[in-house]
Image (tube, rainbow, N blue to C red):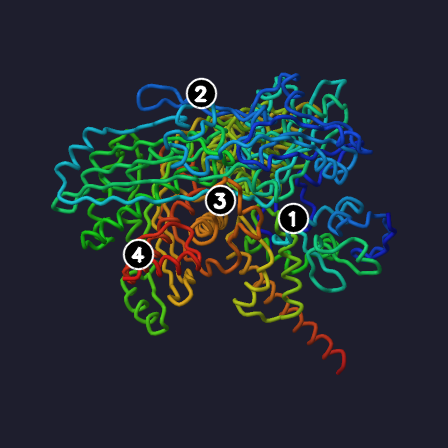
Amino acid sequence: MTLLRHEDRRLITGSGKFTADWNLEGQIHASIVRSDRAHAEIMSIDIEVARSVAGVVAVYTAADVTASGFSPIPAGPDIVGAHGEVIIKNAMPLLAIDRVRFVGQAVAMVVAISEDIAHDAAELVEVDYRELAPIASTEQALTQNAEQLHINASSNLSLVYESGDSKKVEQAFATADRTTTLTMESQRLCGAPLEPRAALVDYNATTDVTTVYTPTQGLLGMRAALAGITGLQASDIEIVTEDVGGSFGLRGGPGSEHGLLVLAAQQLKRPVKWVARRSELFIGEWHGRALTLTGSVALDKDDQITALRFDDTVDLGAYNCYFGGFIGTNNLSVTMGGAYQIPALYMQSTLVYTNKVPVTAYRGAGRPDIAFAIERLIDQAAAEHQLDAVEFRKKNLISKEAFPYMTANGTEYDCGDFSAVLDKALDLANYSSFSERRKAASLQRKIRGIGVGYYVEKSGAGGAPKDQVSCKFSGDGTLTLFAVTGPSGQGHETSFAQIVGEGLGISVSQISYQAGDAKQQLIGNGTGGSRSLYGVGSAFKLLIAAVIEKAKPYAAVALSVDVDDIAFDGGRFHDRSATNSIHLNELVSQVAGEEEHPFNVTAETTTGANYPNGCHVAECELDPDTGVVEIVAYAAVDDLGNVINPELVRGQVHGGVVQGAGQAFTEAVVYDDQAQLLSGSFLDYAMPRAGLVQSMVTDTHAVPTALNELGSKGVGESGCSGSLPALSNAMMDILRQLGAGPMDMPYTPYRVWQHLQDNKA
Amino acid sequence: MTNVAFTVNGDSVQIDVEDRTLLVDALRDKLQLTGTHVGCDTSQCGCCTIRLNSQAVKSCTVLAVQAQGAEITTIEGVADDDQLHPVQAAFSACHGLQCGYCTPGMIMATIELLSTNPHPTDQEIREGLSGNLCRCTGYLNIESAVRAAQTEMAASHRNEGLISTGQKS
């Protein structure tokens, strides 16, 4: 068996290097004291007992952070609301100042000579709280006389956002032949990458450089945000990230702990290490999703959709952190019309504070949620108005000829062939013979349902102005590629090497990839928005041409011909007559000397967003006696543009689909009515396990985009954008057969069984 | 502090540990065997799975002092120098890993599964992996890896059988 990826050998032999694996001479350890109250005033914090414990080096509270001049966690972009107002932002302080606003908020930090002593002493920090009324839901937050979480946010509102044309939509609804309205929850989730959040910070007083070992999605984002928090120059911060145990959107920037560790390392002049325990991540790491979406669709007498409207409520949690505000606004609105030609679109979303963990990006960050909502609404409308759900879709899909297609709220989809993708998916799923499988299931006393989900999502354009890459040749024939985008399982080392290896006609085994070497001084985007392959990969595609151009004069000398007569093909430079040739490898070693290799070049490109889309078809079976639902068949056809590495792409689809299946069937962050977290461990928060999805057939239908050099579209987030609606629609199909109305995720046996009892036909 | 002696990957070791020290922490912190990972604190994720006296255990459920006299294999001891164990090779070949954080535990659980049940059914594979979480792969390629390793190991057992039969005659 041959190894599939460059990164695999170290990871299967236990020699990968994750953050907790780093240790530095003289390091000391931090433990975070977290609030056990959802909403309370801090009357006093007594740190004396903790500080007196043998081995404790220091105890920090908000006063120390304030004295240091450190800033809070970045609160995200200035999003503009429905009436031109800018989002109200409340940034989370590194340690709670005067008031705690969610269970898990960091209140103090203990630093000690061992991890055990730090944790023991943290238990001895006495916080005296005066409890305030907790806000445990968005409904409660918006009621009159609700306790106000932040002084600047009356009614607990951060923003009311809108997109599209409300008048046009109103008119369409007024004249509609039929309408359908549905409210759906995309429940709060924990991203839960398996490597816990961790950091090790080392301050070098001689060079004034602060080195931070930590998992990231990209070094520049982490460095810039940490510079913002600490006031340090970005150039005085070095981020070291080797292996990253999953990110899913949670690792774009620092948490409180990163800032606190910098403070401690600078003041104590010793390396400080902190590795989260899983139980504190359920309350201390960002949550995702937490959206309530109410969709309405208007149809004319020919079953054409004439308007679509969404009214959404976004549970931000207690503070605005990073992308939290972006999810319920831009990311919901940008593809709100889905795959359909709808002349009038309007959405409004209300961003609300609650006493819960702040929300930020989690795989898809609003895009799976809106795909789920549109597709459930389509099925609901079909069911209410006795339409065939597939025919109804076909009638309203944006036709191939309509591209580039401008949606009614101003998003331009550059290309696609939605009908072809839909047909291919139906074929792959054997959709036409479903009724036989339903019949067979009924003989086993099982109720079998089928669900179709068509998603269109916007892959990220990225926040950086461009993606730069560079390369370094060595005389021994090895080639190192550089960019800033940091992998966390996607296989950057393999796919970038593949692109460059194919282009230069050299073996991928010679090529390695390194993310974020500071000496290269590159700029670019981190991993996020499914964009690394097409963004950074496109820059590597350009780098190939740059290397060839740089090498041509040397090849001309080596072959004693005019440079204009040099051509390059399959790794070899040759003259026009093709009688003489030299391989790039040979030329590289010939030219190598003491100086920097002349073939070392940089390349850069700017890639806009693109629109991966696909159709997923799921079949599920319910045992009506127990409420247990099994996913019994799954087919996915995705238009990801040109596919560079089919195995890696399939892996991304599998992983995304199962994360969606996790949301659909197992996962939920649960708070009680006092905003106390009930799902605080893997015992209570049900992660998908082997067997949740037992088989999957996948295929692609490439409509290459012209918006980047590779013609590729994003894939990282597409899986859950397809699986949330497909699985949910299969579930609703089952419920309809039993005469029960719709229900919200997760479709756990208990919830399904209870729903059936409550809604007996 | 208590002195504990055991064998890890064939080497005899002696370390001083606190009574409360978990075996996983002793392996990682005292012996620098950082291939064994910690992904939770409730023995749910399986990232810390090792083999202890030829049985897979989650090393976060064992105190270091309980390992007195034990024979331990960690992920670092699975390959025979540069020769990968068939389970390791199969995980890569079948793309059964992405970020790689759960992988050492998955590989140890798979070795356990195939050593106790060389021909597991699909359902038995899922049960064999039920103590291990993966957030990246969706498990399907991990299941393929288990099947590929099973085929590879069965073939090599057959070959060994043929060789030994040949020697007898």
How far apart marks 3 and 4 lie (CA) works out to: 42 Å
Q: Secondary structure at mark 3?
A: loop
The answer to whether residue A6 is above or below residue A563 is below
Q: Quadrant of the N terminus of chain A?
A: bottom right
Secondary-structure class at tag 1: loop
Q: What chain does mark 4 sit on?
A: A
Q: Amino acid at mark 4?
A: Leu
Residue labelled with disc 4? A426
Q: Are marks 3 and 1 on the same chain?
A: no
Residue at numbered disc 2: A152
Q: Are marks 2 and 1 on the same chain?
A: no
Q: Is there a contact, CB below 8 Å, between mark 2 and mark 4? A: no
The residue shown at (35%, 60%) is A756
Q: Which residue position is annotated with label 3?
A: A672
Q: CA distance from mark 4 to mark 1?
A: 44 Å
Q: Residue at x 83, y 48 (%)?
A: B17
Circle 1 Cα neighbour tier, 10 Å, few/some/many (<14 / 14–19 / ≥20): some
Foreground pick, A369 / B77: A369
Q: Amino acid at mark 1?
A: Asp
> What SS does tag 2 mark?
loop
Q: Disc 1 designates what residue?
A: B41
**Chain of the residue under the numbered disc 3 shown in the image:** A
**Is the residue under label 1 in contact with that under label 3 (CB below 8 Å)?**
no
